[in-house]
Every structure is written in structure tokens, then in C-alpha cells.
Amino acid sequence: MNHNESELLPYSGSIDGLLEKCANLDVDAIEQQVEEQNKYESLYYIMEKFDCSIEEAEVLYEDAMKAVIKEQIDVLVAQGKVKIVGTDADGETLYAAVDAEKKSSKKGKKVSRKKS
């Protein structure tokens, strides 16, 4: 894990000092650390449940992640927010976001009314 060890040490000091320390934290780095930690915990859980190696666990993890992403894309397609635009050379489905402006213009144009 790539992180600054001093950021993980317990803080002792004033409230203002704590707020300043929190304001200066690298949010992207923290999110990456959390993501890595979650992945490692998932991998070890898979290893334990399926009695497999880390390499096998990584394959199972990636397959599970792809399945979750596929489910979410299917929901977006059903909602009309994403459309299928074709397939690639490997036969994988290609998707594109539906243009919000085109979608709203299909519903009908608003006509202004004169007040009488």
C-alpha cells in the first residue's frame, strides 16, 4: 500500500490542528487506499471460502467485478441512459451514453403560452 505512515498515526493536538491536518489530506490517495484494502480483504475472503491460491482468487474477484458491472450496465440500458452501439473484434458489446439533450427533445418541445 502506498501511503504516508504519519497520516495513519493517532493524532494528538488541538482541534484546529486536527482540522488543518484533515484539510490537507490527499482524498484521492485515501480513496485508493480504501479501494486496495477492500480488494485485499475480498481476495483473502475468497481464498478462505474456496480454498484457493491468491492467483485463483484474483481471477474469481475479477469475474465477480465484471458480473457486477454488467448488471449495472444492463440497468442503465433498461433506463435508457446507455445504448448498445455494436460489438468489438472479440464480440464484446460496445455501449455509449445516450445524449441527454437528444433524449429530452424526443419527449416534445415546450411551447410558451401568452398570458391573457
Image (cartoon, helix red, strand yellow):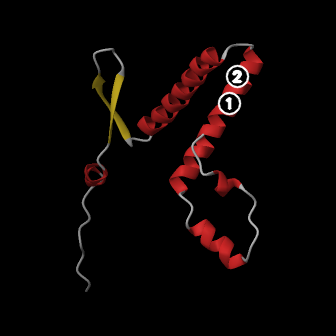
* Corner quadrant of residue 34: top right
Examine the rendered structure and indicate whether residue 57 appears above or below residue 15.
above
* Corner quadrant of residue 10: bottom right
Q: Which residue is pictured at 62% across the width and 68% down the height?
A: 21
Left or right? Give the position of 38 relative to 107.
Answer: right
Disc 1 residue type (three-letter): Ser
Position of the C terminus by quadrant: bottom left
Examine the rendered structure and indicate whether residue 78 appears above or below residue 89.
below
Marks 1 and 2, how far apart at CA:
6 Å
Q: Which residue is pictured at 39% across the width and 43% down the height?
A: 81
Q: Which residue is pictured at 36% across the width and 23% down the height?
A: 93
In the image, 91 versus 50, the foreground residue is 50
In the image, 21 versus 89, the foreground residue is 21
Residue 55 percent location from the top left of the image: 60, 16
Q: Which mark is residue 46?
A: 2
Q: Which residue is pictured at 59% across the width and 48% down the height?
A: 3
Residue 99 percent location from the top left of the image: 29, 47
Q: Do tag 1 and tag 2 residues touch (Cβ < 8 Å)? A: yes
Residue with the mark numbered 1 = 42
